[in-house]
Image: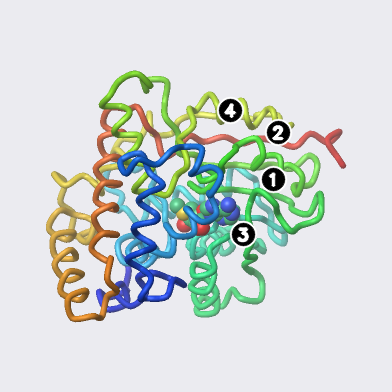
Amino acid sequence: MSNKGTLDLATGLGGKIDKTDVLSAVDKYEKYHVSYGGKEEERKANYTDMVNKYYDLVTSFYEYGWGESFHVAPRWKGESLLESIKRHEHFLALQLGLKPGQKVLDVGCGIGGPLREIARFSSTSVTGLNNNEYQISRGEVLNRNAGLDKTCNFVKADFMKMPFPDNSFDAVYAIEATCHAPDAVGCYSEIYRVLKPGQCFAAYEWCMTDAYDPNNKEHQQIKAEIELGNGLPDIRLTSQCLEAVKQAGFEVVWEKDLAVDSPIPWYLPLDTSHFSLSSFRLTAIGRFITKNMVMALEKIGIAPKGSQRVQNFLEKAAEGLVAGGKKEIFTAMYFFVARKPVHGAQ
Ligand SMILES: C[S@@+](CC[C@H](N)C(=O)[O-])C[C@H]1O[C@@H](n2cnc3c(N)ncnc32)[C@H](O)[C@@H]1O
């Protein structure tokens, strides 16, 4: 659990958005989504505005509830949520075969929780790419606190147009981030371009599974809740992601939906019927307490106006994720390792 308090949550809420503009930003953000009449084409055309508004609004909630790593993980019996999150990061480093001294790119790095863990685990230099200025400012403080500011850095840019020369990195990974891309082939092609030939890209992707029926109203509603609650323009099928990796030029080393074999479901921490002391803030009682604190802080003007609305769409996100996970129509861990062929040098 994070060591950030409710006051940090309230004061960080809105990120780089002026506190007096938070309510109108919530309005604008919600209107991008199906439940508020929004269209997929608009979300895709305005993905930078939509995704940045989302992360400005929610980052302090994420940090308060999840800590420094903003992703879920498959989990073994007897393992805590935090242990499973770190193991998921170590697994990625092992699958990429990271070696000390290598230059690694983290695409869509959040506030850098995975970046710091992977850099320490593998003795590599990790660059975190992120288009959200507020998250980068948080990440820089946390890197300094961890003593990693000399070997790891952040770059503010869009992963659809990366400011790096061709063949720059020894490895690239993305954790639950490229799902925000308006076009998977475009995003993976940029990753392909900046990766050195013969080297690998690995990712945990958010996807709809083959069990998703686009004509089923309940499935549609779950998908829309996940999009609204998580700043997504659309959610691709696992098969579409795999096809996009190949179209970008990669050879797929292996791929699998890791949710399938997880002894404890990844969505359990978000399920209100589950109780855990170690992830108390994510439980029904923890969320109830946070809701009331945020309501009170908004009333007395410490949290900006619109704060409770942010919490409401995050509740929708949790409901959608749990329903999608239970019905097995959605996965937060479609995993693949893909290699840029040696003959792919540009
Ligand atoms: C769910 S968070 C995951 C963060 C991080 N990988 C982690 O696990 O802690 C998704 C991240 O992708 C970033 N992101 C979304 N769209 C992006 C874009 N077009 N370019 C760069 N970063 C982007 C967001 O700002 C956010 O940091």
**Residue where numbered disc 1 is placed:** 191
Which label number is shown at residue 248?
Answer: 2
Q: Would you say the beta carbon of the disc 3 residue lies within 8 angstroms of ligand 1?
A: yes
Mark 1, Cα crowd under 10 Å, few <14 / some 14-19 / many 20+, is many
Percent of width and height locating residue 100: 69, 59
User: Of helix, strand and loop, which one carries label 3?
Assistant: strand
Q: Would you say the beta carbon of the disc 4 residue lies within 8 angstroms of ligand 1?
A: no
User: Which numbered disc flags the more N-terminal residue, 4 or 2?
Assistant: 4
Mark 2, Cα crowd under 10 Å, few <14 / some 14-19 / many 20+, is some
**Residue where numbered disc 3 is placed:** 129
Residue under the image location 65 percent in, 51 percent down: 98
**Residue where numbered disc 4 is placed:** 242
Res 114 seen here: no
- Considering only vertical position in the picture, is 110 above or below 341? below
Residue under the image location 35 percent in, 34 percent down: 223
Q: Quadrant of the C terminus?
A: top right
Residue type, label 2: Ala
Q: Quadrant of the N terminus?
A: bottom left
Determine the image quadrant of residue 62. bottom left
User: Which numbered disc flags the more N-terminal residue, 1 or 4?
Assistant: 1
Q: CA distance from mark 1 to mark 2?
A: 9 Å
Q: CA distance from mark 1 to mark 3?
A: 11 Å
Residue under the image location 48 percent in, 27 percent down: 237
Percent of width and height locating residue 122: 61, 58
User: Which numbered disc flags the more N-terminal residue, 1 or 3?
Assistant: 3
Residue type, label 1: Ile
Residue under the image location 66 percent in, 71 percent down: 151
Evaluate if marks 3 and 4 touch, with contact meaning CB atoms under 8 Å apart.
Answer: no
